[in-house]
Amino acid sequence: MNSDTRDGHLEALIDRTRLAEQASALGLDKRPDILAQLAASRREVLAQALLQQELKHVTDEAALRRRYDDVKSTLARRQVHVRHIIIRWSDNATEAERRGARDRANMLYARILGGESFEAVARETSQDEASAARGGELGIIREGQVHSMFFEAAAALKQDELSRPFETPYGIHVVQALAAVESVVPSFEEAKGRLGADARREAESRLKKDLEVKIPVKRFSDALGAPDAGVPSSGASKEGET
């Protein structure tokens, strides 16, 4: 952070502090609606602080590496190296437009079967401009990265095999597999984000269940949102509170 940016942040903090001090001087921090907002902010800050403290150990590097070793075999995903040609259609394409796209794709399929190179036909006709410039080359695609209809059709091909034209919600495709489908396990670095999210979600769920037992709460659903001198009710209280 450069000095100008730091100074700007400092000035903004000073301005907000002055505004808050003046609000207190005017007694705004005693208004019921403001007290409710302050209580809500305090509750949120404390809840986040507890989550960070209690869940930190499940998302550190060592914990995630142990988790990776435990679940590595379940992380395997299929992948296939392909090139494709697509004739696109829009979501609201008419049946006549779809029929025209099918006819065009069948013609391109016939050209390739007739001896024209896939790359040349893709460069000339594919409506995926990025891959068309590379002769239809999509590279290696993994399960889950593309529409399932596209992946399953590509994964069913043997090396160098050409698919018949097939449909997805995006249009008509002709695909050639440049390598047979294979199953790969992502590296720890590739899986780290997902592992961390899963670990945090599971640990947070366990923590909430533990707290349900440790801190019983009575629910007053009828009071939720009911006005009380401008103070929104939380609709709940810890047992023993009035």
Image (tube, helix red, strand yellow):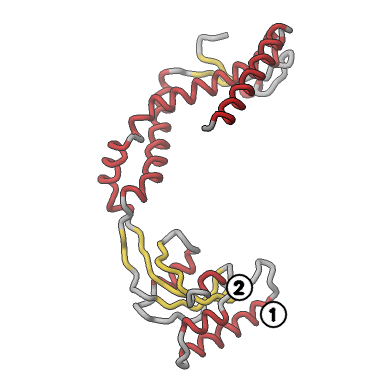
Mark 1 or 2: the one toward you: 2
Near mark 2 (Cα within 10 A), the count class, few <14, some 14-19 or many ≥20, is many
> Residue 27 vs residue 155: left or right?
right
Q: Earlier in the sequence, mark 1 or mark 2?
A: 2
Q: Is residue 142 above or below residue 13?
A: below
Q: Which residue is mark 2?
A: 88
Report x, y in % for residue 207: 40, 27
Residue identified by numbered label 1: 96
Judge whether 93 appears above or below 235 on screen: below
Of the residues shown, which amino acid type is indicated by label 2? Arg
User: Up-down: is 225 above or below 165?
Assistant: above
- Say what amino acid the circle numbered 1 marks: Ala
Foreground residue, 205 or 4? 4
Q: What residue is at 68 percent from the left and 77 percent from the top?
A: 95
Decide which of 224, 110 is in the foreground and name it. 110
- Name the quadrant containing residue 237: top right
